[in-house]
Image (tube, grey):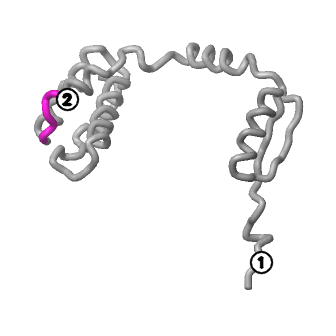
Amino acid sequence: MLGKPTHRDGCFDFESHHHIGRKVGTAGALAHGAQALPGTHAGGRDELNHIASTLKCIGYPEKITKQVLRNLNPNSLPSPEELFGQFRKRFADMDKPNGYVTLPYISGITEGLRRILQKQNIRGATKPLNTAKNASFP
């Protein structure tokens, strides 16, 4: 394998008091990192097998391990050309704004006003009415 092996064994023990989402997310991040390593397909498969055995050793149920490995998308990393194309497609339709406005933030009013201005292609920024600078202290 061309890439340096990931720090594969640094994962929460399943019996730890971390939230289940944190444990599954960490396992998924390890699997995604192994999938993204440069090299051969067989080397990536060996890396994923190592992660699966490590998760089993630290108490992860087989159901969760299979779920993490099943959720991997083989084409999850787009090429630089695809990324550039996505960027251009997203921002090509953006027109220059018709104007800019700074609004005082008033809860319940400013949000609606900004939405109305956005429909007219006017960008708005908010600023608080009360700041520490203009507050009077006894």
Q: Which mark is residue 136?
A: 1
Q: Position of residue 21 (x, y in %)?
A: 30, 40
55 is within the stretch colored magenta: no
Residue at the far bottom in the pictured view: 138
Instruction: Determine contact: label 1, label 2, CB under 8 Å.
Output: no
Instruction: Give the residue number, with chain letter if any, for mark 2.
Output: 65
Q: Which residues are magenta?
A: 59-65
Residue type of the residue flagged with mark 2: Thr
Badge 2 marks a residue whose secondary structure is: helix
Describe residue 96's horizontal placement relative to residue 52 as left or right: right
Badge 1 marks a residue whose secondary structure is: loop
Q: Nearer the viewer, mark 1 or mark 2?
A: 1
Using the image, determine if residue 28 lies above or below residue 92.
below
Q: Residue at x 26, y 27 (%)?
A: 68
Describe residue 127's horizontal placement relative to residue 35 as left or right: right
Give the quarter of the figure containing the N terminus: top left
Q: Mark 1: few, some, or many residues within 10 Å (few <14, many ≥20)?
A: few
